[in-house]
Amino acid sequence: MTLGKVCSAKGNRTPIARMKILSTNRYTMAPKNALLCPSTGKKRAKVLLFFDIRKFLCHFFCIIEKNTVILHSEMKKKSLIIVFLSVFAICVWADDVRKPDYQIADNTFFDPTRKDKVEESYHFGVEYRIEAGYVQHQQRSKKITYPDMYLHGARLGATFTFKLPLHFGLQTGLLYTMVYGGQKQHWRSQDAPSVQEEYIQHRVLEHNFTIPVRAYYTIPLWKQLNLFFYGGAQLHIGLAENDYMKLHLSDKTKTWLETQGIHTAPYDRMADELTRANIQLGVGGGLEWDRYRVQAGYDFGLNNQIKHPQIKGQHMWEWGWFVTFSYRL
């Protein structure tokens, strides 16, 4: 009886049969209870190989599924970060669009009845103002017996400005000015025994009208705050310049001065000595806020104020500066 028949008949397991089964399937590790029969052992080996491949595939797909879950979670995190950044950028952009421009003047905040200043300020039209302020005149003389002096006073009047494009304007008007000043004029005593100081105390009160002709240029700064400059001429029309003098002279000195044609009693200088017209050229500038304006300037006298010069080169000029406040009607 052969070995195969013995195995099929009795089902015994021998080491030789186990070794043949192992030799026929080199890729499968047979378990200890594997059949030693060649015919049944080969079939069982194939079954074991199928289960090992299935186990391998299951493990492989588990690894793939695990990596896929990890990859999906990472992509999900990146997607959330991108969405958050996009929402943040949109919010910043929207806030910047809604943010007001504080450099643009809101005129209704200061005067709700006003129209837009940009539209009404630099078009053709007329602007009326009331002006008042401080004025100082300086009389400068050359080769004249009358002393130099400073006159201080006030100015009051009205002006109107023709508004032109490109922030330009042309102003004129009528201003009344009154100034007052005093000065001592010393004289040599004609009385030999006299040792006292001899002088004339001049007290001058001047009245005049001023007609300015000025070109203005305005520079907008911030909201309703503007900076402006001007240049031009003005004409002083003298009304009176009264000298209310007080004498501190001896009789002999007073008599001698009268023989020299020097006044020793109060009089109007414009009626006797000075011209009434005084042409000046000036420059200045200031600041403007809404309807209010403060300005300062200096004016240079051009013509000689002496009506009848007694000697060659005899001159007197009247210069001045001012600080005024004006209100637009």
Image (cartoon, grey):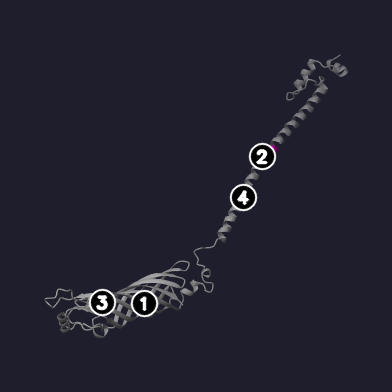
Are dots 4 and 2 in contact, CB under 8 Å? no
Q: Residues within 10 Å of mark 1 (few under 14, many from 20)?
A: many
Are dots 4 and 1 in contact, CB under 8 Å? no
Q: Nearer the viewer, mark 2 or mark 3?
A: 3
Q: Nearer the viewer, mark 4 or mark 2?
A: 4
Considering every residue shown, the one lying at the far bottom of the view is 271
Q: Distance of mark 4 from mark 1, alpha carbons?
A: 69 Å
Q: Distance of mark 2 from mark 3, alpha carbons?
A: 98 Å
Mark 4 or mark 1: name the one nearer the start of the chain: 4
Considering every residue shown, the one lying at the far right of the view is 9
Q: Distance of mark 3 from mark 1, alpha carbons?
A: 20 Å
Determine whether the residue tagged by mark 2 lies in a helix, strand or loop.
helix
- Work out whether residue 216 or residue 205 is closer to the camera in this orientation and state it: 205
Mark 4 or mark 3: name the one nearer the start of the chain: 4
Residue 1's place in the image compared with 244, above or below, is above
Amino acid type, residue under disc 2 in the picture: Ile
The residue that mark 2 highlights is: 70
Q: Residues within 10 Å of mark 2 (few under 14, many from 20)?
A: few
The reply, left or right, for residue 269 in relation to residue 129 is: left
The residue that mark 4 highlights is: 84
- Work out whether residue 164 or residue 195 is closer to the camera in this orientation and state it: 195
Task: List x then y, in percent, for residue 130.
Answer: 42, 77
The residue that mark 1 highlights is: 155
Start-end of magenta stretch? 65-70
